[in-house]
Amino acid sequence: MEENRKNGETAAEAAELSTESQDKSRKRKKKAKAALSFVIMALLLLALFFASVNIGSLKVGFGELLQGLLGNAGENAATVFDLRFPRILISMLAGAATAVSGVLFQSVLKNPLADPGIIGISSGASFAAVVITAFVPSLFFFTPLFAFLGGVLAFFLVYSLSWKGGLSPLRIILVGVAVNAMFTGLSSALNSMIGGNSSGVASIVNGNITMKTWDDVWTLWPYVAAGLLLAVFFAGKCNLMSLEDKTARSLGVNVNSQRILISLVAVLLSGISTAVAGAISFLGLIVPHIGRILVGSDHRALIPFSMLSGAFTYLLADTIGRTIAAPYEISASIIMSVAGGPFFILLLRRSKKYGA
């Protein structure tokens, strides 16, 4: 009897050790997969950057490009530096900002389909930017700030109208679609009222970054850098906010204040990118979902990875848009809408929260 009991204990200990070994092995594989994903995405982004520089009628070698960056630019390198570099950098900055914005919104709203374009944040920011560009062009460098305020207004509308004893994922999407349609209509109406003659207004409404200059880069990058740093700072809180509110409160988290703070960072990132690059649909939806597959749901890894993959995805969309129908161009926002629409429908059909 005693021998059987000892054998049972030994078997239980062996099973426990085997389970622990399997858990450690799975964790090692996940970490290796995440590290490999980071390296591959960084290399892809670097390769796409140099490819985008050379796609077009003017081509420069790596050596000539490096000399141009050091101040010894030839004629071709100088032209590329003045015309293509701003567009490429804006694509990367706006893509990174929008993707991380989507990660933050999905965390605080507990909604896998939350995207700044779908729930109306981008259109609210776009409308504010259009108003400033059309009527107060002297405040051009403060456009991202006003776009942020427009995004805050849109988020307040979505959040307050969706609240009914709690946040329903379905109500957020439905109210967000309505708010998005309202602000999009107002922006288009304003563009038509001024005759569509303002290239600044038209570029925001249409999401066109063709004529962007270094001034736009200098306007955009400080806000993006600040927003991304804040997003990394709140990464640990995002992990807690992804839990149920009761669970998060039991862990000592002030859910309401953290939700507001993280939402403001998300609105800032979405608003500033919209102010310069226009509204970008579905980027904040696609990139976070791909990121969760490759690096997991830990926001301490997901947010940095979304920066890289967001920059890569939007730069890829812009590069495809200016080559697929050359010499004509298709804006990157249209490419993202075409690619993101089916992706959104697929997620909608697979989600148990949005129907049987």
Image (tube, helix red, strand yellow):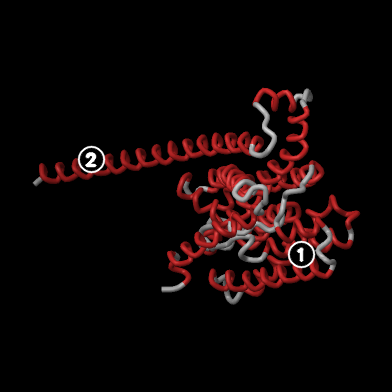
Q: Secondary structure at mark 1?
A: helix
Q: For this view, does 102 lie left or right of residue 268?
A: left
Mark on residue 14? 2
Looking at the picture, tell me which residue is in the foreground, 152 or 218. Answer: 218
Q: Quadrant of residue 268?
A: bottom right
Q: Position of residue 57 (x, y in %)?
A: 68, 37
Q: For this view, does 281 lie left or right of residue 90?
A: left
Whichever of callouts 1 and 2 sits on the residue coming sooner in the sequence is 2
Q: Position of residue 200 (x, y in %)?
A: 81, 56
Which of discs 1 and 2 lies nearer the camera? The answer is: 1
Looking at the picture, tell me which residue is in the foreground, 126 or 299. Answer: 126
Q: Quadrant of residue 86?
A: top right
Say which residue appears at 11% left-offset and 45% top-offset. Answer: 4
Say which residue appears at 50% left-offset and 36% top-offset. Answer: 40
- Neighbourhood count class around disc 1 (C-alpha, 10 Å): few under 14, some 14–19, many 20 upward: many
- Neighbourhood count class around disc 2 (C-alpha, 10 Å): few under 14, some 14–19, many 20 upward: few
Task: Give, as a three-letter code, the residue at label 2.
Answer: Ala
Q: Position of residue 239 (x, y in %)?
A: 54, 52
Task: Give, as a three-letter code, the residue at label 1.
Answer: Phe
Mark on residue 127? 1
Say which residue appears at 56% left-offset and 45% top-offset. Answer: 309
